[in-house]
């Protein structure tokens, strides 16, 4: 039997005037699960997160967080939540450690609990030696880690992460992923939005692919790839002039050919043999690359567009 | 963590609890945390702004009262008795300083925190509701007003402008004035999106400062201008403090106080409504 759902959304809808940001999506998240919302900018991911946090009122549909409706029980629901917003909104007028303490007081937590907890979280975020620093003296990755540490001050059962690693360099991203993975191991339910495929593959047990406010597909990263893609992808570049016209000549190679402005993708279970077939047809690509399919390809297949424009 | 306990006993009891709370999702009775944050931030910020707000009315008092005062001589006070020009303008300047402090805190400060520091967004992702934030910020504005008023009253004492024990009441009365402006200021700021719009506040405040019978009696104006001035909040503050400072009370005193009580009530209604609209859309 599955663990009980901590988040249930049914036909969740949000409109801003004419614009429908979230268009009747339904999903469930179980306790301890790591659940992703994947989609391009403007897909409705952040709006969904705001509704879960009770800081945005839904237009229609049902939403329940730990059995409570965030619309009528905002403070109670948020007592269970940790929130890492898309843009860091640390308190620049306070020092690093003060940020954690003050944030904990917003939840009504006593100082006797907050003082040791703040030190523990600084340790977790690898910021112990920065405890007395000013926030604006921190690097982008450090600020992000402090924001995550801050979101854990109330020992949340659910952690909402809105594009946690956007704008960070690769090393900072890996440190962050490692920290998030530890939280997952501790049983924290993670809800994250991202438009990075590798991030979703690293962190999510299950995800929904969202586009224009609708769910396009749902499943684990591996099952989505299995369902919508072949095992491997052959990427060919013929130069920008030929890319668009070469598609016809490649027909029949692999299972499916996708022509993009800058490259041609051939979906095949065996990329190397597909490449041999291309060579046999005397087509000479400038570069060729065989790689495993990723969620990026799933997204392309589902929407006809790539994720990061 | 009573919220936790409610969540575990089932949604029904929590629903009841939310119904019992007057403002439901708007208020979690934790405005104190916002106040604590403000005090902690003040500790590490520059004291210059705080100090400058205190000195401004003192400088006016010295320049006008000490410099201009001997030329003017004595003026008729609220009860009709003659008082020195410095004693005449001092309570008015105190009312102006209460207004300025409260307006600065509830407009520019709030504007910055709302639009640039994104402080309120962070707060509202916790258990805090918009009303906790509003009450906490207004309280901080009043605390600053209290500090200014106490300091200025001390200066009045040192300059020999206090002649009655009643004068001590100008301190709580200044806080009342500050409360009126702070509760309204925050609501008005929530409409502002750009710095240009924020300048309109100064455009409104400066004439009010100069013409609200601050430096001379309102009787110099023709009747219809007097009515206009009397509709403005600062005039009521100036008159209230002027009466208190010499212990000369009349039915008008109650009108001035009532003006501010209504202003506070309307201001809080406006601010809460705006916060609900802005942050719980």
Image (cartoon, rainbow, N blue to C red):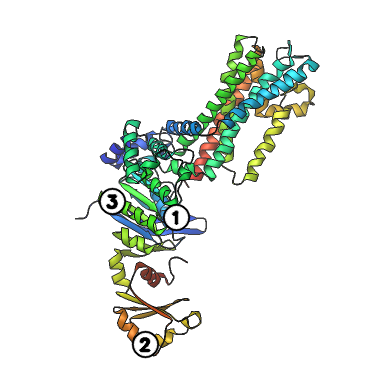
Q: Is residue A278 above or below residue B128?
A: below
Residue at screen point 70% across, 26% down = B230
| Whether residue B173 can be seen here | no
Q: Name the chain letter of the residue that bears numbered label 1.
A: A
* Horizontal side of residue A307 vs B162, given as left or right: left
Q: Is residue A125 left or right of residue B103?
A: left
Q: Which residue is mark 3?
A: A182
Asked if residue A64 lies left or right of residue B39, the reply is: left
Q: Chain of mark 2?
A: A
Q: Residue at x 50, y 59 (%)?
A: A19
Question: Given the image, what chain letter belongs to the residue carrying mark 3?
Answer: A
Instruction: Determine whether the residue tagged by mark 2 lies in a helix, strand or loop.
Output: helix
Q: CA distance from mark 2 to mark 3?
A: 46 Å
Query: Circle 3 — which element?
Result: helix
Residue furthest out toward the front? A129
Q: Earlier in the sequence, mark 2 or mark 3?
A: 3
Q: What crowding class fits label 1: few (fewer than 14 Cα within 10 Å), some (14-19), or many (20 or more)?
A: many
Q: Are marks 1 and 3 on the same chain?
A: yes
Label 2 close to label 3 by CB (< 8 Å): no
Image coordinates of residue B171 in percent, x first then y, are 58, 19
Badge 2 vs badge 1, beta-carbon distance below 8 Å: no
- The residue carrying mark 1 is A14
Q: Provide the residue designation for mark 2.
A: A279
| Residue at the (60%, 34%) spot, across then down | B104
Q: Of circles 2 and 1, which is in front?
A: 2
Q: Nearer the viewer, residue B277 or A166?
A: A166
* SS state under label 1: strand
Give the image location of residue B78, x and y in percent. Answer: 70, 15
Viewer can see residue A22: yes
Which one is earlier in the sequence, the residue at label 2 or at label 1? Answer: 1
């Amino acid at each position: 039997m599955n663990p009980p759902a901590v988040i249930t959304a049914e036909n969740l809808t949000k409109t801003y005037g004419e614009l429908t940001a979230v268009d009747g999506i339904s999903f469930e998240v179980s306790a301890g699960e790591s659940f992703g919302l994947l989609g391009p900018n403007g897909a409705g991911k952040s709006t969904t997160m705001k509704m879960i946090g009770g800081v945005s009122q839904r237009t229609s549909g049902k939403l329940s967080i730990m059995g409570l409706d965030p619309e009528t029980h905002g403070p109670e629901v948020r007592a269970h939540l940790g929130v890492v917003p898309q843009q860091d909104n640390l308190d620049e007028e306070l020092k690093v450690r003060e940020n954690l303490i003050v944030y904990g007081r917003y939840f009504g937590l006593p100082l006797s609990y907050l003082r040791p907890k703040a030190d523990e979280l600084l340790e977790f975020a690898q910021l112990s030696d920065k405890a007395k620093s000013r926030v604006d003296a921190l690097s982008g990755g450090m600020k992000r880690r402090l924001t995550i540490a801050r979101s854990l001050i109330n020992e949340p059962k659910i952690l909402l992460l809105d594009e946690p690693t956007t704008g960070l360099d690769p090393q900072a991203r890996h440190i962050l992923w490692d920290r998030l993975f530890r939280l997952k191991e501790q049983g924290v339910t993670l809800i994250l939005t991202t438009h990075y495929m590798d991030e979703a593959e690293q962190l999510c047990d299950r995800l929904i692919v969202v586009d224009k406010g609708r769910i396009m597909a749902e499943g684990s990263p591996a099952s989505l790839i299995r369902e919508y893609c072949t095992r491997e992808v052959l990427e060919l570049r013929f130069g920008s002039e030929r890319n668009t016209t070469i598609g016809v000549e490649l027909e029949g190679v692999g299972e499916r050919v996708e022509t993009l402005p800058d490259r041609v993708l051939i979906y095949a279970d065996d990329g190397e043999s597909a490449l041999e077939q291309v060579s046999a047809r005397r087509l000479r690509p400038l570069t060729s690359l065989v790689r495993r399919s990723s969620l990026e390809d799933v997204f392309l297949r589902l929407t006809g567009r790539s994720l990061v424009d | 963590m009573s919220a936790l306990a409610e969540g575990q006993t089932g949604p029904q009891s929590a629903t009841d609890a939310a119904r019992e709370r007057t403002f439901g999702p708007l208020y979690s009775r934790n405005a104190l945390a916002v106040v604590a944050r403000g005090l902690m931030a003040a500790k590490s910020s520059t004291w210059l702004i705080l100090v400058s707000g205190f000195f401004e009315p003192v400088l006016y008092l010295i320049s006008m009262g000490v410099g201009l005062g001997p030329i003017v001589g004595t003026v008729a006070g609220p009860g009709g008795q003659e008082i020195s020009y410095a004693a005449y303008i001092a309570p008015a300047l105190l009312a102006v300083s209460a207004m300025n402090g409260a307006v600065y805190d509830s407009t520019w400060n709030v504007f910055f925190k709302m639009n640039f520091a994104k402080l309120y967004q962070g707060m509202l992702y916790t258990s805090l509701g918009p009303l906790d934030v509003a009450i906490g910020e207004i309280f901080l504005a009043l605390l600053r007003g209290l500090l200014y008023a106490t300091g200025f009253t001390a200066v009045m004492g040192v300059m020999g402008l206090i002649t009655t024990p009643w004068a001590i009441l100008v301190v709580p009365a200044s806080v009342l004035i500050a409360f009126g402006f702070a509760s309204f200021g925050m609501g008005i700021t929530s409409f502002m999106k750009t710095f240009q719009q924020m300048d309109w506040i100064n455009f409104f405040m400066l004439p009010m400062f100069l013409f609200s019978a601050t430096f001379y009696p309102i009787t110099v104006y023709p009747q219809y201008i007097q009515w206009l001035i009397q509709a403005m909040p600062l005039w009521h503050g100036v008159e209230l403090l002027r009466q208190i400072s010499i212990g000369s009370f009349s039915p008008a005193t109650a009108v001035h106080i009532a003006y501010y009580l209504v202003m506070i009530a309307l201001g809080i209604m406006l601010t809460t409504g705006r916060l609900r609209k802005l942050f719980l859309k």
